[in-house]
Image (cartoon, rainbow, N blue to C red):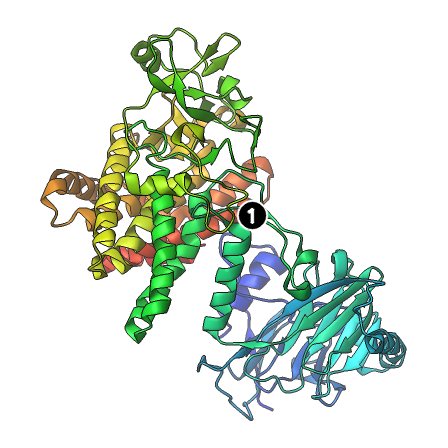
């Protein structure tokens, strides 16, 4: 075997390996970049450093760091520490047909030519899935032979654990061969399946842990056995999980998830957060019923799903599958209508985007005709002393809040709002006052059907309602706003612009009208979403001062720069909103003025940063994501790295936001800014 030795300053060593050394092992560099590195492909027992080569041979470092090779098919292990001069190995890294071993002073590169180079491509073949079903310990549906086989796997584990090969795996509680040269290992942390010769649709090592694969989440495995159909049974002290391995094409899998989304997540056209007990799913085709637990960001979750539908619609149309395309079209339309409704349901007529709406007839969040959950909620269809129809704030804890400098949140009524409404109270709700707001806006007729008709999937949970039954939530975050514009883009580009259906043309007109109103609201309000009290919503802010660094050395909890770390994402959001509007309004005379306004603001984003000027130089923020996040984390926990501040909801929002920017922007320098910015997430 060819082995090369390199000093640690050699440019031959893979960057990922050196980054892992500097950031994790020696901690000589701050954690300001992503680590494209997995310390161990088999993180069990004494195996803390391991990697597979091109021939599915496992390379690992033993307890004292000595280098070993393990042939899983032959169940043989050999020490090859001489390849690294008997020095302790700190990390292993596979790159093509090379295995890199890092020691304290050098890096060793072993050439391992691939004996076979199978192509793992998506050629349309059905691929193996994991479909779990759950059974309590004494469930009569568990076959007796499964109970017997699981017990036998405990005895087999004792024999396996005594062998040299399995010594590295630590405690083995169950063992069974899979009939194809591989084996299942039960451990106190779950089950590991090691395949001798993995097919195209299965990983070399598969781990089964957590409540999805272990009954009630108890990871101490007491038995494992094959189901004789490529699946397996896992036993613990509480019950059994049968993991079937059916094969689905990508289309079949997508259709299954569409079905689950409809059954478990939809409410009047939106996808929402739900409670669902996984122990009821999969047994005899039964599914738990939908139970909403959040009133935040319905549009955000819905649009993530609808983005995929936009491409699916495009492909099905291209393939000539008109029936399939129409089914997807209806889903896209319904999500788009729901997103549009959130900008109209309030009746303010000013482009504001609400966070959510419910009906007093709904099964969730209301009790005795009143809202029964937190937030700033406003009830439609009420009458003031003059007999005029108004929207009135519901009496909640949030409605009684005032100003909170620690959170940068102000819910006190502004002087402008008090003057316009002729009131003197300083809060939306007090003991003797409830803010009433005029509703000059009219909900478009095609959007009303979302609440005037029974929900097509869950009519018993979301029945037909009147407009005066609706209660909407404000204090909207940036998630709902950016999600709306992303949906407008995908629906318009991949559906409306390619359709001759008059209903889709009408939808396109409504998209442009609504996008124009919301963009005008944001720009006229100073790059923010202004709530019913006249101040910006807590998280609906994109103005320059929101991102300012703390230069006054004030305590962090008192300074309004608490959103310093949000600049990169929010900067990308406002650029996306502007660029989408340019796309929607281009060559439309009715929106010529707003197109020019959006284009001017967009151009300003690529100019210099000007302190206090909204939009100026925002493109520069995109390259500062990890640096800003690390600095923000360090304020709370000195020495912390940027990973402490990662918000994975923001990760989802980032890919959504950059997507239209990369599809629409044609200038290569600006595209590079977007690509580099996205690569930091």
In this view of the protein, which residue sits in the foreground, 514 or 77?
514
Query: At x 40% / y 47%, what residue is drawn?
Result: 624
Q: Quadrant of the N terminus?
A: bottom right
Query: At x 51% / y 80%, what residue is drawn?
Result: 126
Is residue 529 shown to the viewer in this render?
yes
Q: Position of residue 172 (x, y in %)?
A: 83, 72
Reply above or below: 142 against 436. below
Reply above or below: 347 against 591. above
Q: Position of residue 113 (x, y in %)?
A: 54, 90
Is residue 50 shown to the viewer in this render?
no
Determine crowd level at label 1: few under 14, some 14-19, many 20+ residues with C-alpha closer than 10 A: many
The outermost residue toward the bottom is: 115
Query: At x 59% / y 82%, what residue is drawn?
Result: 53
Q: Position of residue 27 (x, y in %)?
A: 60, 55
- The residue identified by callout 1 is 641
In this view of the protein, which residue sits in the foreground, 42 or 648?
648
In this view of the protein, which residue sits in the foreground, 226 or 26?
226
Q: Which quarter of the picture shows residue 217?
A: bottom right
């Amino acid at each position: 075997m060819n082995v090369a030795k390199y000093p640690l300053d050699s440019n031959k060593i893979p960057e990922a390996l050196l980054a892992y050394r500097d950031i994790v092992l020696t901690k000589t560099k701050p954690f300001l970049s992503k680590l494209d590195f997995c310390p161990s492909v088999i993180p069990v027992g004494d195996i803390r450093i391991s990697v597979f080569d091109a021939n599915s041979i496992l390379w690992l470092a033993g307890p004292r760091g000595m280098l070993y090779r393990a042939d899983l098919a032959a169940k043989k292990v050999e020490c090859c520490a001489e390849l690294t001069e008997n020095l302790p190995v700190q990390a292993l890294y596979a790159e093509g047909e090379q295995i890199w071993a890092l020691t304290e002073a050098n890096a060793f590169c072993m050439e391992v030519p691939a004996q076979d180079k199978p192509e793992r491509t998506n050629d349309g073949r059905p691929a193996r899935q994991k479909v779990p079903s759950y059974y309590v310990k004494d469930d009569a549906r568990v076959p007796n032979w499964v109970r017997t086989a699981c017990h036998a796997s405990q005895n087999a584990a004792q024999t396996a654990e005594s062998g040299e090969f399995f010594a590295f795996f630590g405690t083995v509680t169950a063992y069974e061969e899979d009939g194809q040269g591989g084996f299942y290992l039960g451990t106190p942390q779950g089950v590991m399946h090691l395949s001798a010769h993995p097919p195209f649709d299965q990983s070399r090592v598969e781990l089964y842990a957590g409540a999805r694969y272990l009954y009630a989440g108890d990871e101490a495995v007491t038995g494992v056995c094959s189901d004789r159909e490529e699946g397996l049974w896992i036993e613990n002290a509480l019950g059994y999980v049968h993991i079937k391995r059916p094969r689905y094409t990508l289309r079949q899998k997508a259709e299954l998830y569409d079905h689950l989304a409809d059954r478990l997540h939809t409410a009047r056209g939106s996808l929402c957060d739900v409670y669902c007990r996984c122990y009821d799913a999969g047994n005899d085709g039964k599914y738990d019923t939908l139970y909403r637990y959040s009133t935040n960001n319905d549009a955000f979750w819905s649009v993530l799903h609808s983005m995929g539908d936009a491409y699916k619609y495009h492909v099905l149309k291209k393939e000539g599958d008109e029936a399939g395309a129409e089914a997807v079209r209806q889903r896209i339309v319904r999500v788009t209508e729901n997103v549009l409704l959130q900008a109209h349901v309030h009746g303010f007529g000013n482009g504001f985007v609400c966070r959510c709406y419910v009906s007093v007839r709904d099964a969730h969040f209301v009790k005795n005709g009143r809202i029964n959950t937190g937030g700033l909620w406003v009830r439609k269809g009420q009458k003031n002393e003059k007999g005029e129809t108004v929207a009135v704030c519901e009496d909640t804890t949030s409605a009684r809040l005032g100003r909170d400098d620690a959170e940068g949140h102000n819910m006190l009524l502004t002087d402008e709002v008090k003057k316009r409404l002729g009131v003197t109270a300083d809060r939306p709700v007090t003991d003797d006052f409830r803010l009433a707001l005029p509703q000059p806006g009219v909900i478009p007729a095609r959007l009303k059907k979302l609440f005037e008709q029974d929900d097509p999937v869950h009519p018993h949970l979301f029945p037909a309602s009147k407009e005066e039954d609706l209660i909407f939530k404000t204090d909207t975050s940036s998630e709902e706003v950016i999600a709306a514009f992303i949906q407008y883009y995908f629906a318009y580009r991949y559906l409306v612009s390619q359709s001759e259906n008059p209903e889709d043309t009408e939808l396109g007109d409504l998209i442009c009208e609504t996008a124009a109103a919301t963009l005008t609201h944001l720009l006229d309000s100073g790059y923010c979403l202004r709530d019913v009290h006249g101040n910006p919503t807590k998280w609906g802010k994109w103005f320059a001062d929101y991102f300012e660094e703390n230069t006054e050395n004030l305590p962090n909890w008192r300074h309004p720069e608490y959103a310093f770390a949000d600049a990169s994402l929010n900067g990308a959001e406002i650029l996306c909103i502007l660029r989408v509007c340019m796309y929607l309004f281009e060559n439309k005379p009715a929106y010529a003025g707003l197109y020019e306004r959006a284009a001017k603001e967009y151009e300003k984003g690529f100019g210099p940063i000007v302190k206090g000027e909204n939009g100026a130089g925002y493109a520069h923020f995109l390259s500062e994501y990890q640096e800003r996040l690390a600095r923000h984390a360090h304020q709370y926990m000195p020495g912390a790295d940027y990973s402490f501040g990662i918000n994975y909801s923001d990760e989802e929002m980032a890919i959504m936001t950059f997507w239209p920017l990369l599809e629409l922007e044609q200038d290569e320098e600006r595209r590079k800014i977007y690509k580099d910015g996205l690569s930091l997430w």
